[in-house]
Image (cartoon, rainbow, N blue to C red):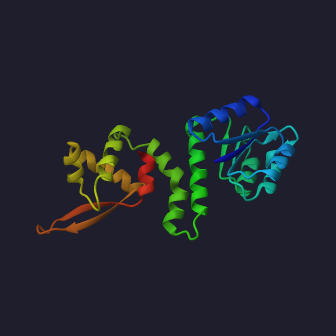
Amino acid sequence: MRVLIIEDDPMVAMIHKEYFKKKELTDDLSHVTSIEAAREYLENNDVDLIVLDNYLIDGQGIEYLPELKGYPIIMITAANDVQTVEAALSNGVVDYLVKPFTYERFSQAIDKVQDYVKLLSKEKINQDLIDDYLNSGRVEEEEDSLPKGLSKITLKKVLEAIQQHNGGFTTQQIADKLDISRITIRKYLNHLVNINILSEDAEYYTSGRPVSVFTVESESKLEKLL
């Protein structure tokens, strides 16, 4: 990924570079400190992502945004007023991070850009691909706030067991595989249905009683939770 960081604070730029290094995206990182330098760089170089600060030595990044139309942009800035955020979003930034921010939030922003680039690289886009992109951040947020009584460790085990199934599966099958009670497994499956990772259907067997059968609704969302 070819990245241009537009940031006038060298310490902040260094943090950005370290975070890109943790993401193993250090093949082509460039840094400029002003809008004028960014203009000159972009005249002679192609980039896949621009990381843009708002308060720069020769102007505001928000005013420079219209010139950057067509580039995937993450704004990382101390500006947290509604007007700046609204202007950034209306100018098409892929994500907006308010300083200070965590590596986890930075990583999520980079993942979002990569999903965005991947989406637009296709000749045709179906509804499932659009939904996966628009809901990618939502899955992570909802996983971080699990319903009371559920744990991330057990959720991971359930997800791994689900991945080993081809086609539909029942609560009992996952419970037997993990040696966890059926009632407990049912809570995790219900949660995954609620966040649109699984779908649930009733099937009728010889006994006549309906049995819930689950199928994976979105492989990409499931993988994001692992």
User: Picture coordinates of residue 30 (x, y %)?
Assistant: 73, 41
Q: Nearer the viewer, residue 204 or 166?
A: 166
Give the quadrant of the C terminus. top left
**Residue occupying image coordinates x 11% and y 69%:** 206
Residue 36 horizontal/vertical position (percent) = 87, 45
Image vertical order of residue 86 relative to residue 154, above or below: below
Kindly tell me whether residue 100 is visible in this rendering. no
- What residue lies at 88% left-to-right and 41% top-to-bottom? 58
Location of residue 149 (image quadrant): top left
Quadrant housing residue 125: bottom right
The structure residue drawn at horizontal position 81% and vertical position 38%, both measured from the top left corner, is 33
Picture coordinates of residue 60, whole percent (x, y): 83, 44
Instruction: Name the residue nearer the viewer: 153 or 124.
Output: 124
Residue 2's x, y, as percent? Answer: 67, 47
Image position of 190 (left or right of 82)? left
Task: Determine whether, in the image, residue 221 is placed left or right of residue 157.
Answer: right
Taking the image as drawn, is residue 181 in sight? yes
As drawn, 125 above or below 50: below
| Residue 218 sits above or below residue 57 on the image | below
